[in-house]
Amino acid sequence: MRLPAWSLAVVAMLSIQLGSALSVSLFPAVGPAGTAWLRLALGALILIALVRPSVRIITRKNLPGLLGLGVATGIMTAAFLTALDRIPLGTTVAIEFLGPLTVAALSGKNARAALWPAVALVGVVSLTRPWTGTVDVVGVGFALIAALGWALYIVFTQHVGDQFRGLQGLALSTPVAALTATVVGLPQAWGNITLEVLAFAVLLAVLTPVFPFALEMLALKRMNKRAFGTLMAVEPAIATAIGLVVLFQIPQLFDALGIALVVLAGIATQRDAVRPPLLDMPAVVDPKEL
């Protein structure tokens, strides 16, 4: 059965946000950066066991892309979970979404698309409400770092996906991501890793990064980074819904308005795209790649 491209992205988003919400449970034991490190390290081990990549396929030409993707993934994951420790899930994802939305706007030829990141920024202001004086500047700062990491992740994922067959690139870059997160994650987690923590971390590693990152890698092998970035427009809404159900983070009126503006900006950017809408694109799953 051939699956459409949009379905892969939606399932990936659901898995990522559920994994993010459940990650909060590990923060008291190993900290947000420690959780990021455990997720990536265990995810790397799982991917290596499943894919069995060969280091012999790494060349001087594709090495920078692998390193770039790994470092971007490590920074994105650690910064995102650190932000999530301080601000709600929906707000964190909305701020982080500024990264791929900017990539989408800058990679297009339509000048009008460049206006939509500004609309999303208004939405972020509505979410954080700086005029109240209660905004968590540190949390917002880490979410912005995650936004930069997400933008670079999209660029490098397509680049690596074009150079490696199947999930080889993902399996080779994830250990780099784990090593990147080790710098801040290991000091937080050291001395607090139990069998219970490891078992839960394995579940989180499957939810994210293994399952969704694999779907995203397959999708980005067949679509441009602007189309992929704008498809992520619904992710802040998904994150808000999961934050409500799993973390009991109840959105207020300004939160709903902010999420709506961010989602609107993403959808509008996709409408301004030169390529056909994703719903009209061919399926991205090749049975040989799964």
Image (cartoon, helix red, strand yellow):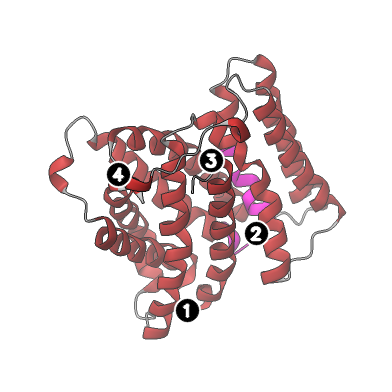
Residue at which label 3 appears: 5
Q: In the depicted view, which residue is nearer to us: 76 or 108?
A: 108
Q: In the depicted view, which residue is nearer to us: 20 or 50?
A: 50
Quadrant of residue 126 within the rendered picture:
top right
Residue at which label 4 appears: 169
Residue at which label 1 appears: 29
Q: What percent of the width, then of the height, locates residue 116? A: 70, 28
Residues at marks 1 and 4, CA–CA distance in whole angstroms: 32 Å
Quadrant of residue 271 within the rendered picture:
top right
Q: Residue furthest front?
A: 1
Residues at marks 2 and 4, CA–CA distance in whole angstroms: 29 Å
Q: In the depicted view, which residue is nearer to us: 248 or 127?
A: 248
Q: Residues within 10 Å of mark 2 (few under 14, many from 20)?
A: many
Q: Say if residue 136 shows up in the picture.
A: no
Contact check, label 2 and label 4, Cβ < 8 Å = no
Residues at marks 4 and 3, CA–CA distance in whole angstroms: 20 Å
Q: What percent of the width, then of the height, locates residue 70? A: 34, 47
The earlier-in-sequence mark between 2 and 3 is: 3
Which element is circle 4 on?
A: helix
Which element is circle 1 on?
A: helix
Q: Residues within 10 Å of mark 1 (few under 14, many from 20)?
A: some
Q: Nearer the viewer, mark 2 or mark 1?
A: 2
**Kind of residue at badge 2:** Leu
Which element is circle 2 on?
A: helix
Residues at marks 2 and 3, CA–CA distance in whole angstroms: 25 Å
Q: What's the residue at 41%, 58% (across, down)? A: 210
Q: What percent of the width, then of the height, locates residue 110? A: 64, 15
